[in-house]
Image (spheres, rainbow, N blue to C red):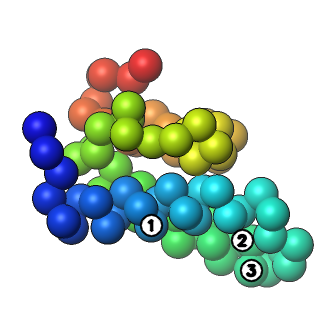
Amino acid sequence: MAETQEQWYNRQAIEQLAQHIPFERDLACKAELIEMLRGLVIRHGRGMDPLSFGFEARNELIRLGLWSRIGPEGTQI
């Protein structure tokens, strides 16, 4: 199943936020980025293929407890 352009943009936003968060030094900014990431995952995560995420993004999503919201419910790797 091919991603639509909107799905691709949403996945890229999630990946880039997840990859950036560990390197953010400002705690207020880091908290804001985590909330933005959480909102994106809650809104769009079920429609995404878990296999399309890179290693760093996947690890950060697992660390934040958001990985279970990626992909259809009950199909976690």
Residue beneath label 2, please? 31
Question: Given the image, on which type of amino acid does mark 3 rest?
Answer: Cys
- Label 1, label 2: how far apart the Cα atoms are: 16 Å
* Residue 44, numbered circle: none
The kind of secondary structure element at disc 2 is: helix
Which residue is painted at 47% across and 60% down in the image?
14
Badge 2 density bin: few <14, some 14–19, many ≥20, Cα 10 Å: few
Measuring from the top left, give residue 57's x and y in whole percent.
58, 47
Are the two marked residues, 3 and 1, in contact with CB atoms closer than 8 angstroms? no
Q: Amino acid at mark 1?
A: Ala
Amino acid type assigned to the residue bearing label 2 in the image: Ala
Where residue 52 sits, quadrant-wise, is top left
> Would you say 48 lies left or right of 32 here?
left
Left or right side of 73 for 3: left
Q: Residue at x 28, y 30 (%)?
A: 73
Pointer 1: what residue?
13
CB of mark 1 within 8 Å of CB of mark 2? no
Q: Earlier in the sequence, mark 1 or mark 2?
A: 1
Above or below — where is 15 with respect to 67? below
In the picture, which quadrant includes the C terminus?
A: top left
**Residues at marks 3 and 1, CA–CA distance in whole angstroms:** 16 Å
Residue 41 image offset from top left, x and y in percent: 41, 55
Looking at the figure, which quarter contains the N terminus? top left
Q: Assign a secondary structure to mark 1.
A: helix
Closer to us: mark 1 or mark 2? 1
- Asked if residue 69 is positioned above or below residue 9 in the image, the reply reads above
Residue 22 visible in the current orientation: yes
Q: Secondary structure at mark 3?
A: helix
Q: Nearer the viewer, residue 9 or 71?
A: 9
To which residue does mark 3 refer?
29
Pointer 3 with pointer 2, Cβ within 8 A: yes
Query: 55 above or below 45?
Result: above
